[in-house]
Image (spheres, grey):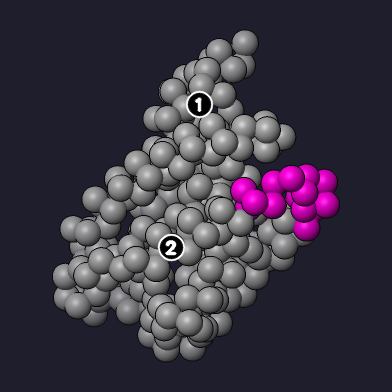
């Protein structure tokens, strides 16, 4: 799912960099303010970045010689909101490109947008919607992490389809082909990421309850009970 170095045409790579930059700038401001106003959350922020780094670095071979992986960025969106995750994801993706040859610098903008912008915003939206619909906290976290993973995967497929449209069926046909390449491995990986994220949130609620409370993290009460 990380688009490899040099794989995108130069104009596409530049365009995705321009699109991702405002999100990263906003995220940098948000993280700086968070560290100034709530310094006790530094360890949680570091844990969210480490979770994303480890999960997204574990590649599972897919069909046609490609690979799939979880993203881990849903956890940060669930704990801090999506605006914080763009900076975390950029740091993670930069280190992976430089140290692991996973992704690339020319494709960094595209990978940041899919994994650190689109995925986290979808995860956060699903979390809020699930809580509003009175889903239990564990189910809300699971659905949020799963949806963020799938949103990243579909965004990457869309980016590749825009760069390499099918000669006969255009963008839509190319999108279906790229999405189909990753689907056999990405769908179960999304479920695994959802389960792991629930386990991590449960652990953090047990051992970092004060820090989570300072972030107004939701309780086990259903969304309806929390609103009452």
Tell me where residue 24 appears, x and y as whole percent: 66, 65
Residue 41, above or below 184: above
- Please state, as top left, top right, bottom left or bottom right, where the N terminus lies in the image: bottom left
- Displayed quadrant of residue 147: top left
* Horizontal side of residue 178 vs 44, given as left or right: left
- Crowd around label 1: few <14 · some 14–19 · many ≥20 (10 Å): many
Q: Which mark is residue 213?
A: none
Viewer-nearest of discs 1 and 2: 2
- Displayed quadrant of residue 30: bottom right
* Horizontal side of residue 155 vs 22, given as left or right: left
Residue located beneath label 2 in the image = 54
User: For the point 56% across and 53% down, which residue is it?
Assistant: 47
Residue located beneath label 1 in the image = 131
For the record, the magenta segment spans 32-45
Say whether residue 157 is visible. Answer: no
Q: CA distance from mark 1 to mark 2?
A: 28 Å
């Amino acid at each position: 799912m990380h688009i490899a170095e040099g794989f995108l045409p130069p104009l596409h790579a530049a365009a995705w960099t321009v699109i991702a930059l405002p999100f990263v700038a906003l995220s940098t401001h948000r993280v700086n303010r968070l560290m100034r106003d709530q310094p006790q959350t530094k360890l949680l922020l570091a844990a969210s970045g480490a979770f994303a780094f480890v999960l997204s670095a574990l590649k599972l071979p897919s069909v046609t010689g490609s690979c799939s992986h979880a993203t881990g960025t849903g956890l940060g969106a669930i704990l801090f909101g999506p605006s914080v995750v763009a900076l975390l994801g950029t740091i993670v993706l930069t280190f992976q490109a430089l140290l692991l040859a996973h992704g690339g610098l020319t494709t960094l903008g595209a990978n940041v947008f899919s994994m650190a912008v689109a995925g986290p915003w979808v995860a956060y939206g699903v979390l809020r919607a699930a809580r509003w619909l009175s889903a239990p906290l564990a189910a809300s976290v699971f659905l949020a992490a799963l949806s963020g993973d799938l949103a990243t995967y579909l965004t990457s497929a869309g980016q590749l389809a825009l760069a390499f449209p099918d000669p006969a069926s255009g963008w839509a046909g190319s999108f279906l082909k790229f999405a189909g390449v990753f689907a056999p491995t990405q769908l179960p990986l999304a479920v695994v990421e959802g389960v792991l994220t629930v386990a991590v949130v449960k652990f953090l609620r047990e051992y970092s309850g004060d820090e989570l409370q300072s972030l107004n993290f939701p309780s086990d009460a259903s969304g309806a009970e929390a609103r009452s």
